């Protein structure tokens, strides 16, 4: 989005925010109205096109639709949460053997990552630890995306090799 279009959208947000909040308030209540308007403008920002004219009626309609979507999502979330029992979302208790095995697996994985060549380790950590995309990594390290893919494959294979296959439970 160019700077002129961004400024127009920003001015529009400042001028229409209160009116749109009132529209959203009628659908989702005061607590979520500001979030609905913010979500609407974030969506508009992400796909602002030159051929779309953001008239007051367009914004009001878009706010109503966003509020309805927000209300439906909240209703689904509340219904799902109300149906859960404590046993369904409580973490299962681990046995001391499971804890020890997990720690050993983690140590082997850390050792495998440390043993990787520097660039392979950088690519892997940027992706898995810092959440960078392959394109971002390629740009930042000044390498091709295919090199990033190859380095990630090497790192993943090294991590898999460090963790022995799980043994099947003994037959009874």
Image: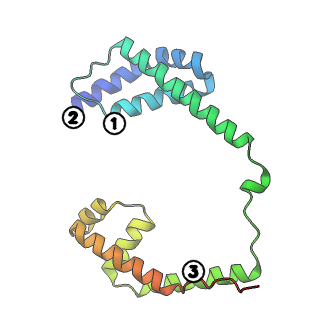
Q: Residue at x 74, y 66 (%)?
A: 92
Q: Residue at x 64, y 83 (%)?
A: 168
Q: Earlier in the sequence, mark 3 or mark 1?
A: 1
* Residue 113 in sight from this viewpoint: no
Place of residue 95 in the rendered image (x, y in percent of width and height, measured from the top left): 76, 77
Label 2 and label 3: CA atoms lie apart by 47 Å
Q: Residue at x 34, y 33 (%)?
A: 45
Label 3 and label 1: CA atoms lie apart by 39 Å
Give the secondary structure at mark 3: helix
Q: Earlier in the sequence, mark 2 or mark 3?
A: 2
Place of residue 94 in the rendered image (x, y in percent of width and height, measured from the top left): 74, 73
The residue carrying mark 3 is: 106
The residue carrying mark 2 is: 2
Q: Earlier in the sequence, mark 1 or mark 2?
A: 2
Relative to 121, is 77 on the left or the right?
Answer: right
The residue carrying mark 1 is: 46
Give the secondary structure at mark 2: loop
Label 1 and label 2: CA atoms lie apart by 12 Å
**Quadrant that contains the C terminus:** bottom right
**Quadrant that contains the N terminus:** top left
Marker disc for residue 124: none
* Residue 107 in sight from this viewpoint: yes
- Which quadrant of the figure has residue 141? bottom left
């Amino acid at each position: 989005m160019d700077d002129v279009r961004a400024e127009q959208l920003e001015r529009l947000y400042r001028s229409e925010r209160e009116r749109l909040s009132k529209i959203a308030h009628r659908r989702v209540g005061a607590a979520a109205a500001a979030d609905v308007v913010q979500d609407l403008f974030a969506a508009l920002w992400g796909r602002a096109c030159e051929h779309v004219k953001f008239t007051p009626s367009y914004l009001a309609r878009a706010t109503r639709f966003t509020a309805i979507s927000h209300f439906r999502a909240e209703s689904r979330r509340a219904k799902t949460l109300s149906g859960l029992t404590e046993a369904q979302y409580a973490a299962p208790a681990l046995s001391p053997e499971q804890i020890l095995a997990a720690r050993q697996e983690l140590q082997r994985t850390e050792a495998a990552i440390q043993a990787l060549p520097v660039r392979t380790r950088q690519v892997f950590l940027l992706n898995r630890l810092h959440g960078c995309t392959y394109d971002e990594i390629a740009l930042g390290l000044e390498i091709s995306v295919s090199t990033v893919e190859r380095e990630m494959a090497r790192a993943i294979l090294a991590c898999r090799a460090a963790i022995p296959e799980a043994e099947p439970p003994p037959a009874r």
